[in-house]
Amino acid sequence: MKNEDYKGTPKGVLIPIGGNEDKGIEESEQYTLEFVEDGILYHVVQESGGTDAHIVVIPTASSIPVEVGDNYLEAFTTLGCKNVTVLDIRSKADSEKQSSIDLIKKANCVMFSGGNQSKITRKIGGTSIHKILVDRYRNEAGFVIAGTSAGAMAMANEMIAGGSAAESFIKGAVNMYKGLSLIPELIIDTHFIKRGRFGRQSEAIAKFPNLLGIGLAEDTGMIIKNGNQCTVIGSGMVIVFDGSTIKHNNESILEEGTPMTISNMTVHVLSNGDMYDIKNRNVTVLPIEAPFI
């Protein structure tokens, strides 16, 4: 699907979220379930039409999809939602099942969990479900696609598939793959502050300087309307990388493992209520006396 060639104005809403781990400090996903705080989920519910909205949770990215699905069922129910379904897609064949297609067609909101973003593109990319998601996002006002962590990163076309934060600013520290291309103008990274991912997003933008890099802190997200107007929600920061102003970029001529040089890249640090215009690359800062949203 060449969604990056789409030149129209999407009518739907995207909500990429930076992720949040709410259990323990162990590295195993059994103990560190990707989860989103109630404040962020409240925004997802409201954008989807309220507590009567039909919300479909897709935990495909997770290695423990049943547990993650149950977590979101409980969380959305706590917020008063009455119509929440978990769609456990574990293969491309699952993405072609009529029952799965029917769920996606009638959902007001589809929410992708955290985990491994490459699982989303391998099992959903190019399938009937993917095509329906793209079509509905482009053409249906009020249709919401939300995603936390891996689910947010998969929204891009040029998707960060992995990479070392310890080798920041070294060519080859970031691995790129094709995402779902819902918003091809962006490269999205998550857990951005806690995991020190400034370097790998910098390399990603050095590779694709015509795109915008979005680094989402945990418990932080953006509501993106019309494929353009972004509003920051949550308790943390969003870091925006604009490569259009770069004056020197030696990424293309370096061998892997070599330190990179990037000069004059524009970086914005945004927080709750601030807005960003993707097309015009403009920041609108919320007045300091304004209430937290």
Image (cartoon, grey):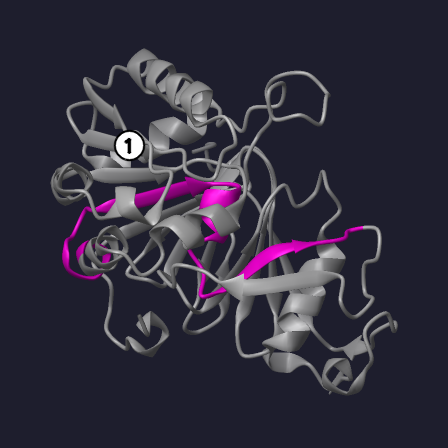
Vertical placement of residue 266 versus 92, above or below? below
The quadrant of the rendering that contains the N terminus is bottom left
**Residue at left 43%, top 21%?**
38
- Where does residue 96 sit, x and y in percent of width and height? 22, 48
Q: In the rendered image, is residue 32 in sight?
A: yes
- Where does residue 206 sit, x and y in percent of width and height? 68, 75
Horizontally, is 13 left or right of 24 in the view?
left
Q: Nearer the viewer, residue 227 or 155?
A: 155
Residue on which the image places disc 1? 87
Q: Which quarter of the picture shows residue 6?
A: bottom left
Horizontally, is 141 left or right of 236 in the view?
left
Q: Secondary structure at mark 1?
A: loop
Confirm whether the magenta stretch covers residue 23: no
Q: Nearer the viewer, residue 94 or 290?
A: 94
Vertical placement of residue 25 versus 249, above or below? above
Type of residue at label 1? Leu
Confirm whether the magenta stretch covers residue 140: yes
Horizontally, is 240 left or right of 119 in the view?
right
Q: In the rendered image, is residue 273 in sight?
A: no
- Where does residue 275 sit, x and y in percent of width and height? 45, 54
Vertical placement of residue 90 versus 176, above or below? above
**Residue at left 72%, top 21%?**
26
**Residue at left 33%, top 62%?**
227
Residue range (magenta): 136-165
**Mark 1 crowdedness (10 Å alpha carbons): few <14, some 14-19, many ≥20:** many
